[in-house]
């Protein structure tokens, strides 16, 4: 997906989850930080960041934090982006396991109170309809030996999605979880069991139940975010 023109600055601090102070060459502004997670390793003072500017002149905070330079690479921190990144990849038939589907529906309401990011249907190889959930990944820690990890905070919502994916599988759907890794410096992904052991246990159960779990990393530049290639997904033992 193409990004709008970005403004470069230096991060002063991120606070109250959705706010950050950024120094744009001596002009300090409060910007929107579209990320509810811990952002471990991505919120240190002095880090170089890039922000987009909203077209809506009435928006209270016109700037949005998009990219952070960390560990020598660009990292996408906007958790609103992965669904569109995944959608473009699905529409271009980039993901081999999913390329036979001809119909792609966004934000599909499966049942009361349960909505999945995508419903894939009308496969030309007679595959059943597939419910697909997308998760954003950008955590990279020394203890994970070069792998990226998810989640970076306890995620009851993520656990609920796994349980619903298992229910969908039992109902006859294909069910899948696609981790979109918004950084390009890892060839594998693990589950951060130390951060959320319940999520790790539920993901293990989902995998055993037949839920398809994939991780793809992005190519990231200051102008675009593009799903690049699949990386090794390590399922908790």
Image (tube, rainbow, N blue to C red):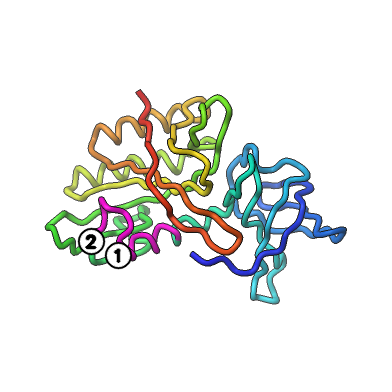
Label 1, secondary structure: give it. strand
Q: Nearer the viewer, mark 2 or mark 1?
A: 2
Question: In front here: 43 or 10?
Answer: 10
Q: Which residues are magenta?
A: 85-101
Residue at x 45% of width, y 62% of height: 84
Q: Is residue 138 magenta?
A: no
Q: CA distance from mark 2 to mark 1?
A: 7 Å
Q: Position of residue 106 (x, y in %)?
A: 36, 63
- Label at residue 125: none
In the image: residue 128, left or right of residue 22: left
Q: Which residue is mark 1?
A: 104
Query: Which residue is the site of mark 2?
Result: 101
Q: Residues within 10 Å of mark 1 (few under 14, many from 20)?
A: some
The residue depicted at 26 percent of the width and 54 percent of the height is: 98
Disc 2 + disc 1, Cβ < 8 Å: yes
Percent across and percent down for residue 56 are: 65, 75
Label 2 crowd (10 A; few <14 / some 14-19 / many >=20): many
């Amino acid at each position: 997906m193409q990004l709008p023109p970005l403004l470069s600055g230096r991060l002063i601090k991120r606070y109250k989850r959705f706010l950050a102070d950024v120094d744009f060459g001596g002009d300090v502004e409060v910007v929107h930080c579209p990320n509810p997670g811990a952002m471990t390793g991505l919120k240190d003072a002095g880090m170089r960041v890039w922000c987009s500017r909203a077209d809506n002149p009435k928006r209270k905070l016109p700037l949005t934090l998009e990219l952070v330079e960390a560990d020598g690479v660009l990292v996408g921190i906007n958790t609103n982006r992965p669904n569109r990144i995944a959608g473009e990849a699905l529409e271009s038939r980039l993901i081999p396991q999913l390329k036979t589907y001809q119909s792609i529906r966004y934000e599909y309401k499966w049942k009361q109170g349960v909505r999945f990011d995508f419903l894939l249907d009308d496969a030309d190889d007679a595959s059943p309809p597939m419910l697909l959930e997308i998760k954003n990944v950008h955590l990279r820690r020394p203890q994970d030996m070069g792998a990226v990890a998810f989640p970076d905070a306890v995620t009851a919502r993520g656990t609920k999605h796994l349980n619903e994916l298992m229910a969908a599988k039992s109902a006859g759907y294909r069910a899948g979880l696609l981790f979109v890794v918004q950084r390009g410096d890892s060839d594998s992904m693990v589950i951060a069991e130390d951060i959320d052991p319940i999520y790790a246990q539920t993901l293990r159960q989902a995998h055993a139940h037949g839920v398809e779990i994939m991780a793809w990393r992005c190519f990231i530049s200051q102008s675009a975010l593009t799903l690049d290639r699949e990386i090794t997904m390590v399922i908790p033992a």
